[in-house]
Image: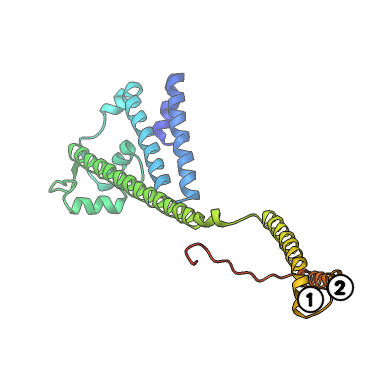
Amino acid sequence: MTDRTQQLMDVASPHEKAELATMHNAVIQCMQAYKKASTATNKRDWDAARNGLHDVVERLWPVYFPAEAAADPEVFEQQKAALAWLHNRFGKPYPSAGKFSQDIRDGLCRQQENRTILRKELKKYAEIIAHDKKAANLSADKAAQREDLEIEKLQLEVAKRKMENRKEDKNWIARDIVFEREGALVGQIMGEARHHLGRSVPALIHAAKGELERTPEIKKILEEALFDAFRAMYESGEIDMTFLDEEAE
């Protein structure tokens, strides 16, 4: 907790203390989340929490410490003091000491000929860095949105491919249904084969110039041969069948 935040906690009203504590806890939680996962979203949340706490401190400080608020120097003799004032008003770590020095060299923060910095120039510079931070947050938001859109696009593509792969599901038949249909088909084939073999026995005997009274005997021999054929097919455990669809036919 910063010195200014702690000082306000010591003198503020219960409602304002609760507001300060809530904002401070939000900063801690977002900082811990960013430490666990250094994502753009967690960084954005951390920055937002720090900015929120800073806004509350800036609003309450003149109320409880008006003398100190009015005592800000008009001129800063050293960059270090100017940077400390910035951090005290706008929160660490932005800008860093290196960036602040570079921004002074680049003219973003105007320095006097005697190398002092006026407070009014610091306020102008603070507006610039606040704008830059806002632009950076917007850029991060857009990047996060693009990332979310890309993820959503990939998810839709995967879902689409899954649906395409499952279009043939309607052509599949459950295993139990297949076994039932195969059993019924085999039974029907056997019945039809026995019936037509029985009807053909007299013709076979006549064609062989044999004795028609031996029809039952011949029929029995043929049926046993038929049963042997089906038994051999069943015991093999495999049936090789090829079906032609309507288009092939």
Helix, strand or loop at disc 2? helix
Give residue 171's mark: none
Q: Is residue 17 above or below residue 92?
A: above
The residue that disc 2 covers is 214
Other residues around mark 1 within 10 Å, as few (<14) / some (14–19) / many (≥20) = some
Q: Residue at x 35, y 36 (%)?
A: 51
Circle 1: residue type: Ile
Q: Residue at x 41, y 26 (%)?
A: 8
Is residue 158 visible to us here? yes
The residue that disc 1 covers is 205
Is residue 133 found left or right of 38 in the rendered image? Answer: left
Question: Where residue 16 sits: x, y (%)?
Answer: 42, 22
Is residue 82 visible to us here? no
Q: Is residue 99 above or below residue 55?
A: below
Residue 221: which quarter of the image? bottom right
Q: 201 or 194, which lies in front? A: 201
Q: Residue at x 41, y 42 (%)?
A: 46
Question: Where residue 106 sits: x, y (%)?
Answer: 17, 53
Q: 176 or 104, which lies in front? A: 176
Helix, strand or loop at disc 1? helix
Question: Where residue 222 sits: x, y (%)?
Answer: 80, 72
